Image (tube, helix red, strand yellow):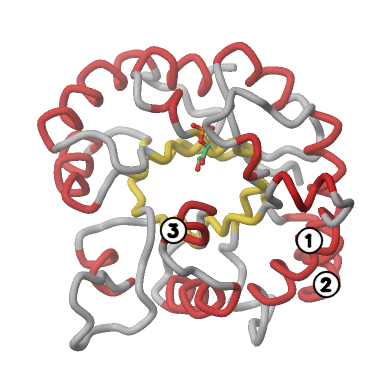
């Protein structure tokens, strides 16, 4: 069975609720009845309600950009999977490189967050990827193997059924530099291999692996036509309704 592609917007720390509504007003008509792929928009927490209201009745799903692994408690500033489910969020990004770089996210916290998201029925989009120094030192494969192994720790194929991975080479994020379709494809194969080791061949064959890092309307088609690339995680180019629609319709 062919894997249905997933095109996801990561708005990072951009847009307020009013701007979120404006985005959807412009975006929805552009992708009306476009059901070829799954579409998800991940705005900041404070915009979730506006996004969910705006997307109601459309094929667009709404996700969060991070989650904490406990259900509730004295954890000032955090949001749980249970809370995301309660507001009707269906997806969540876990382990984005910016969280790893600036907010102390580790392979172990990624694993805890992933397990929490799965337990609550969310679709987690787990980000992995090497930084420039690692690529230049020939460490790309080691880094990705470690990130996958640690993220998948103590999970079964059954529990991990909804897992989605996003390969985001950190040197390609917000830099205008994109991995070539071939480079991305090679890494995706490696990730699929790790998933096969952890969860079996059948699981790995169904696993969706997205590419992220300077995806734009101009390069979306070349990237998406790679057999190994099952969608995109889009930052900057997802903030504008026209440009994100053009990517969705690559
Ligand atoms: P850009 O598309 O802005 O490079 O960001 C990619 C990204 O980090 C998506 O999560």
Residue 242 is situated, as x and y percent measured from the top left of the image, at 38, 12
Q: Which numbered circle lies on residue 132? A: none
Quarter occupied by residue 183: top right
Is residue 137 or residue 66 the one in the foreground? 137
Helix, strand or loop under label 1:
helix
Q: Which numbered circle lies on residue 200? A: 2
Asked if residue 114 is positioned above or below residue 57 in the image, the reply reads below
Q: Which residue is mark 3?
A: 102
Q: Which residue is mark 1?
A: 204
Q: Earlier in the sequence, mark 3 or mark 2?
A: 3
Residue 65 is situated, as x and y percent measured from the top left of the image, at 38, 53
Q: Earlier in the sequence, mark 1 or mark 3?
A: 3
At x 77%, y 74%, the residue is 199
The crowding category of the residue bearing disc 2, from other C-alpha atoms within 10 Å (few below 14, some 14 to 19, many at least 20), is some
At x 44%, y 78%, the residue is 116
Asked if residue 31 is positioned above or below residue 89 in the image, the reply reads above
Residue 93 is situated, as x and y percent measured from the top left of the image, at 46, 55
User: Is 236 left or right of 108, judged from the image as shown?
Assistant: left
* 3D distance between C-alphas at marks 3 and 2: 34 Å
Helix, strand or loop under label 2:
loop
Label 3 lies in ligand 1 vicinity (Cβ under 8 Å): no
Q: Report if the CB atoms under discs 1 and 3 are less than 8 Å apart.
A: no
At x 28%, y 74%, the residue is 82
Is residue 13 or residue 66 the one in the foreground? 13
* 3D distance between C-alphas at marks 1 and 3: 31 Å
User: Is 236 left or right of 157, judged from the image as shown?
Assistant: left
At x 83%, y 67%, the residue is 196
Q: Report if the CB atoms under discs 1 and 2 are less than 8 Å apart.
A: yes
Q: Quadrant of the C terminus?
A: top right
* 3D distance between C-alphas at marks 1 and 2: 6 Å
Residue 197 is situated, as x and y percent measured from the top left of the image, at 85, 73
């Amino acid at each position: 069975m062919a894997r249905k592609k997933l095109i996801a917007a990561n708005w990072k720390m951009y847009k307020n609720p009013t701007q979120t509504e404006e985005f959807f007003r412009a975006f929805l008509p552009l992708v009306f009845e476009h059901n070829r792929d799954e579409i998800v928009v991940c705005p900041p927490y404070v915009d979730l309600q506006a996004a969910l209201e705006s997307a109601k009745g459309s094929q667009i799903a709404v996700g969060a950009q991070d989650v904490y692994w406990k259900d509730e408690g004295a954890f000032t500033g955090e949001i749980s999977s249970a809370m995301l489910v309660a507001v009707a969020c269906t997806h969540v990004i876990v382990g984005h490189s910016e969280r790893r770089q600036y907010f102390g996210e580790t392979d172990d916290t990624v694993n805890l967050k992933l397990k929490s998201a799965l337990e609550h029925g969310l679709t987690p989009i787990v980000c992995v990827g090497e930084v420039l120094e690692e690529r230049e030192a020939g460490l790309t494969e080691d880094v990705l193997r470690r990130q996958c192994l640690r993220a998948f720790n103590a999970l079964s194929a059954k529990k991990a059924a909804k897992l989605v991975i996003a390969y985001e080479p950190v040197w390609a994020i917000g830099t205008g530099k994109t991995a070539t379709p071939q480079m991305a494809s090679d890494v995706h194969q490696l990730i699929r291999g790790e998933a096969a080791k952890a969860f079996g061949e059948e699981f790995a064959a169904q696993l969706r692996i997205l590419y992220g890092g300077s995806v734009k309307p101009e390069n979306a088609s070349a990237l998406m036509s790679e057999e190994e690339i099952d969608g995109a995680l889009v930052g900057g180019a997802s903030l504008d309704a026209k440009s994100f629609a053009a990517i969705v319709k690559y």
